[in-house]
Amino acid sequence: MGKSKKTGILKYLYIIVSLVFILPSLRYLVEHKTVLGFDKWFLFLLNDSSRETQTIQYIFILALITIVYILIIKYRQKLFDNIKKILIFTGIIGLIYVFSIPFTSSDIFYYMGVGRIDSAYGQNPYYTTIREFVDENSKSEEQREKLEKDTVLIEANQGDWADTTVVYGPVWQLVCKTLTIFSFGNVDIGLLIFKIVNLIIHIFNCYLIYKLTGKKVFAIIYGLNPFILIEAITCVHNDIFVILFTLLSLYFMLKKRKLAISMGFLALATGIKYFSIMLLPFMLIYYFRKEKPLIRFVNCLKYGVIFVIVLIIPYLLYIKDFSILSGMLTQQTKIAKSIYIPITEFFKNVTLSDISTFLLYAFAIVYFFTCLTLLFKKKITFSNVTRKYMIFLLIFVFGLITQFEPWYLMWLIPVFMWQSSSNIKLIILIGIIVEFANSVFLLNGEGFENGTPFVLVMYTLILASALVIEKQKNKRKIECFTKRLKEEKN
């Protein structure tokens, strides 16, 4: 058997291990015929067998997927000779994950719930919660009978976020409103629609990454990444839309030189999740890098206005008062997976508010002066700018957001291509590590008390990976230096 045929087997192996991953979901769907009433959170096999058994199987299957994924990256030249083949295979693999039930997050049912009360019942979900609407409309028999047929609302009303108004920007609410129109109140149809849309966006993101870099390897790293497949397609998180709009923003700035359109797309990303605004000054300063500082500053202000206008427009559809922004604060109260958990556990005299306030001010000050320094810097490269942004983003994700969640790491994707090779490896590993760290919750169930072991496992594995990568990097440097010395002697 030739080498090309041997490496070609990797594609079939990836399909097989992905099918094994979704087998519990397929079995559940065959038995229940619906996801209505689904409550098997953090149970990989989606049944009542022992958590130990389920967790071991999850770790083993995820390890197999990871190994095959890394081998595919290694032998990519023999597996894919053009971007079309990468996109087709990404679509095949992604389609498999469409049929997996989101067993580690109920967010998708919350998305559908707030979309449904908006599209079908004309409620403003920034001021009315799913539970408030259901309770209020369950008083009359006629309304109760109508709601009993709306399985989207029934499932959403059982979720942890049912008593919370919308915590995202209005762009995401408009997406939810539009997609739930086509669910017709059926939770299974709604879930399938969201998953298919996420898959289409995933494939398009893969293509955009290739267009931005011209390198197939980055498309493969993103498109077949088990972390992305699990968080974006299995669990249907909206961060994939943020990736889409950010990539489009970068594409129109770097490739088309159309900054106004670029700012519009970045505003759309910010209109989903607010952190995206952090990229704004880095992009503008880079774009006007050849201008003198004062002209650079004026141009940044001008295009900043375009960004703000596009950002504000969707808010006009929902805003009654500034309490619409309370969603940004709501998530700050969710701390089950935060780095603050072990800190406050080991240091009893330290309170959560003390830490978060101090870090927030420190972050804002450093961020401001970094942007100010860039404003006056003469030589600016895009890789340098994005690496600075990446540092702030990592600090934001791991340090300042009180509720760290694995899918937040997707925020790194739009700019990971401009990092150093060692940092790219680490970013890939971090995404996979957090999926393995989730085994803490598979073993014990999700809860505040498991936050410390989750954080400790995650950071220990990340630190170990960083040390191994750094060791390999130093080893290569020594080998290159030794080789150069030999060449000079000869």
Image (cartoon, rainbow, N blue to C red):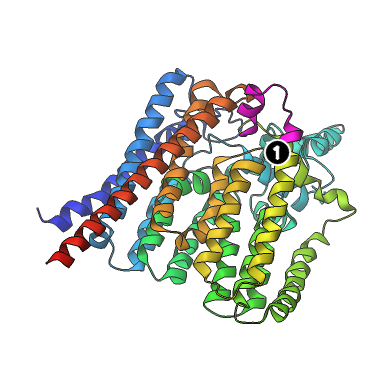
Q: How many numbered tags mark residues here? A: 1
In-image side of 166 versus 449 (left or right): right
Quadrant of the image occupied by residue 293: bottom right
Quadrant of the image occupied by residue 373: bottom right
Q: Secondary structure at mark 1?
A: loop
Quadrant of the image occupied by residue 403: top right
| Residue 193 seen by the camera | no
Read off the magenta span.
338-355
Instruction: Please give the name of the residue rendered at 80% of the width and 48% of the height, measured from the top-left corner.
Output: 121
In-image side of 301 versus 471 (left or right): right
Residue farthest toward the right in the current orientation of the protein: 321
Residue farthest toward the left in the current orientation of the protein: 1
Frontmost residue, 10 versus 449: 449
Residue wearing tag 1 = 149
Q: Main secondary structure of the magenta part?
A: helix
Instruction: Please give the name of the residue rendered at 37% of the width and 28% of the height, measured from the top-left corner.
Output: 57
Up the image or down, 353 lies above or below 327; here it is: above
User: Label 1 is placed on what type of residue?
Assistant: Lys
| Residue 434 seen by the camera | yes
Residue farthest toward the top in the current orientation of the protein: 50
In-image side of 398 versus 168 (left or right): left
Residue 74: horizontal and vertical position, in percent?
28, 54
Residue 393: horizontal and vertical position, in percent?
59, 52
In-image side of 487 versus 374 (left or right): left
Residue 43: horizontal and vertical position, in percent?
50, 27
Instruction: Please give the name of the residue rendered at 35% of the width and 57% of the height, measured from the top-left corner.
Output: 89
Frontmost residue, 29 versus 374: 374
Instruction: Please give the name of the residue rendered at 65% of the width and 32% of the height, measured from the top-left corner.
Output: 340
Packing grade of label 1 (10 A; few <14, some 14-19, many >=20) is few
